[in-house]
Amino acid sequence: MNQPLFRSAWLRNLLFAGGLALLAACQSAPPPKPEFIAASIAGLNHTPVYIASFSVGEGGGPNIPEWGGGGGVTCCYRLPYKYTPGMTAKVRWNATNTREAHWKEAIVPIEPYEDGGGRVWVHFFPEDKVRIVISNYGPGHPKHPAPSPKQSLRESKGEQP
């Protein structure tokens, strides 16, 4: 019985099974989900008052013209990868039509979002109301959960959307 080493069926099968086991062990597991992401910040102004600057938590935002915004984006807000009910953020803003500063501040609920988040959209409304929306969709898109400033302007004039 002088068979070459790999001609033996049982040894060949054993080596094949061992090779498959090694390949299966070498496959990498998917990377773990991050605890936080660095989300960009954009602001939307639904008022007739210029917002000279604003911040969300430790992240700053761009200035926002009256009834506008969304074009300027800054980095970054430390956003949890997964939404947790009850999340809030401190928002500070300087709303002024003069050179004089008029700083305001509010603790604002962060609206529910899908895992992985998106851009932090800060909506400024009349009477110092603020909404924080996390979305990959911009204002005016049907999947963006808040109105666009243009919609708010039309409504303030009594026009239909």
Image (cartoon, rainbow, N blue to C red):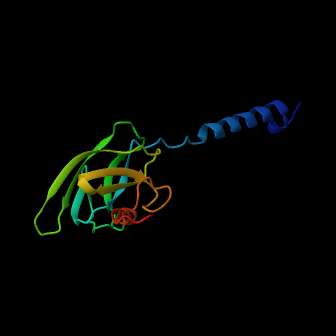
- 30 vs 54, nearest the viewer: 54
Q: How many marks?
A: 0
Question: Would residue 59 be visible to someone looking at this image?
Answer: no
Residue located farthest toward the right when viewing the structure as drawn: 1
- 21 vs 139, nearest the viewer: 139
The image quadrant of residue 68 is bottom left
Question: Would residue 77 be visible to someone looking at this image?
Answer: yes
Residue 61, horizontal then vertical, whole percent:
27, 60
| Quadrant in the picture for the C terminus | bottom left
The image quadrant of residue 45 is bottom left
Residue visible at 32% across and 55% down in the picture? 122
Q: Is residue 18 left or right of residue 31?
A: right
Residue 93, horizontal then vertical, whole percent:
21, 57
| Quadrant in the picture for the N terminus | top right
User: Is 34 rendered above or below residue 75?
Assistant: above
User: Is 85 rendered above or below residue 139?
Assistant: above
